[in-house]
Amino acid sequence: MLSRNISRLSLFVRDLERPIYNISIYGRSTGVVHRTGSQFRIAGQSYIHTSPSSQVFAKDLFLGKFNTDEAFPFPSLSEEEFNSLNELVSPVEKFFDEEVDSKAIDSNGVIDDKTLQGLKDLGLFGQQIPEDYGGLGLNSTKYARIGEAVSSDSSIGVMLAAHQAIGLKGILLAGSPEQKAKYLPKLATGEHTAAFCLTEPTSGSDAASIQTRATLSEDGTHFLLNGGKIWITNGGIADVFTVFAKTEVTNEKGEKVDKVTAFIVERAFGGITSGKPEDKLGIRGSNTCEVHFDNTPIPMENVIGEVGGGFKIAMNILNSGRFSMGSAVASQLRKLIAMTSEHVCTRKQFNKKLSEFGLIQEKFANMAMKAYAMESMAYLTADMIDRPWEGLPDCSVEAAMVKVFSSEGAWECISECLQMLGGLGYMKTYPYERMLRDARILLIFEGTNEILRMYVALTGMQYAGKHLKELVAKLRNPGQNMGLVLGTLFKKAKHGLKMKQKLELFHEHNGVHPSLKDSALKLQDSATSFGMVVESLLAKYGKDIVNQQLMLKRVADLCIDIYGMTAVLSRATRAKADGLRNCDHEMILATAFCDDAYNRCQKLVAEIGRGENFNGDKLKQKIAMEIFENRSYVPCHPLTP
């Protein structure tokens, strides 16, 4: 009888193979809490995280774990820091409002010299370069805030980002003291401009497949660089390039193999030619072109890091800057909401203002919710990066989620604004069509959203797989682990019946404000379900999970929504606790966003549970394969007799 029951349990476990996780959205107290009416505030503190980051907030979500102390309370600056930052931001905003002609930049396809000089005078070429090298020395939070002002013109924003977020970032992250001393001062002032050279005709998202080669000279003093790069922002104006090329190295087995190496390459080295500027759909003022290297000599001392260590450097560079897209896009959306609301509040149709129609109200609510979530995710991530770290900060999963959510939100929201303006939005007289064209690139560069979804999902799945290996092994041997098996089954049943532990949601526990309890419960349920889904997929597919892209897309979307819910609840809680102006409106935004995100999560979990044979995945794959076989749309014309 026992043997039969064990057999049944074994089959049940192999079918589910996932533990239940109870998420408690609360943390440790960090100070004395004062209460005035319904408002809470921790005395004498700005909400700054000073303890070392665990480095795994997003990754732990894949285990069904919620590290409350990583996300609560929401970060904020002290009044002194806030005023100091505004003093830095104000002249930048004034410059963009009064001196930058975005229409002319778009029309002429170039950023004029006067504007470039103004950017240099403001120190915007050295935002994250340390003050010791002549830069502003901004941390990630302050860099994101400056990015809001710079985003007023997308061409300028892209040019500056290509210069410092990726162009010179390799020197900052992995450069030697000598390299930093030599190159950073002129890059900080804008005397020199930087570019990042990775993409090639045969290697886009697959960075490891690059063909550009650097060959060591016979005397071992320098490399000779040969090859070409495409779609290089600042490629025609840069003085300094971070270039990635294949080099021959000897591995631990004594074999000769090709590995990617990162180099600092000066235009002055010679053998460098830039193609004509590309005629682009959007961000037309930024310089984008091909860059070719013909026996370009590179001194040995210009290798960044180690020979053969370039791929990791490239990934660290790209992963470090994506978070700022959230604050930049949200800034654009705030302006768009103001401009478009003016139109709908004055324009009348059918004897009613457009603002009185439900369909218009829904569009504005969705835009505000997306903008609020973008800001919240971006600044929560920036704070995580700014905390003390052992080594380089690793918030790559969080940053990738911010980039995906913000870029897609920008495209959707700007399109909606154009829709509400009708014919006016389509005309070049107004900025909407230009903003729509500029926004399209956001879904492509700095990692396509498809690749980043795979990165989010697979990075988290790999992390979970390492930690769950022992648990899964025990569940597959129920005879020797009966207590664990029965406990797991009970927890699964408990979750299925929606029986949850009572949450500690009060603010003195650093958790969600009591007014947001229902939203916190939805976050808890989503995070719990997510942990279960991850383990069930690992148990079902094993290593083959890397080939299940449609499932991985759902996993990534689940994680993005859970992170978004976390960020808005943390931010709204802090707003309510501090009694910020319009904090009640923030509570509504957070509640509405969590409602929508929860519904999306429920749908995604259900689709994963049904499997590819019943959720439409197999049918879609079959349709696609028949199109590929025919290289065309397959059905006959509808009028075919």
Image (tube, grey):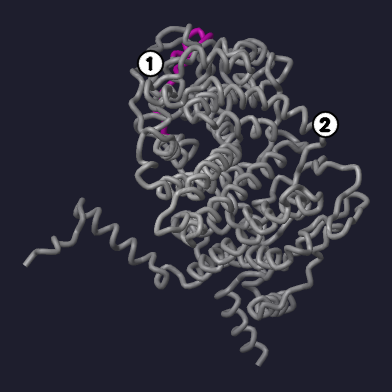
The span shown in magenta is 209-224
Question: What is the quadrant of residue 492 in the picture?
Answer: bottom right
The reply to whether the magenta stretch includes residue 206 is no
Q: Name the residue tied to disc 2.
A: 80
Q: Residue 528's spot in the image, x, y percent?
A: 66, 66
* Mark before the other along the chain sequence, 2 or 1: 2
Give the left or right position of residue 309, taking residue 102 as reference: right
- Marks 2 and 1, Cα distance to the nearest angstrom? 46 Å
For the N terminus, the quadrant is bottom right
Question: What is the quadrant of residue 129 in the picture?
Answer: top right
Residue 68 showing in the rendered view: yes
Q: Identity of the amino acid at label 2? A: Glu
Q: Is residue 571 above or below residue 438?
A: below
Which one is in front, 140 or 583? Answer: 583
Mark 2 is surrounded, within 10 Å at the Cα level, by few (under 14), some (14 to 19) or many (20 or more) other residues, namely few
Q: Residue 380's spot in the image, x, y percent?
A: 69, 45
Residue at position x 36%, y 20% in the image? 277
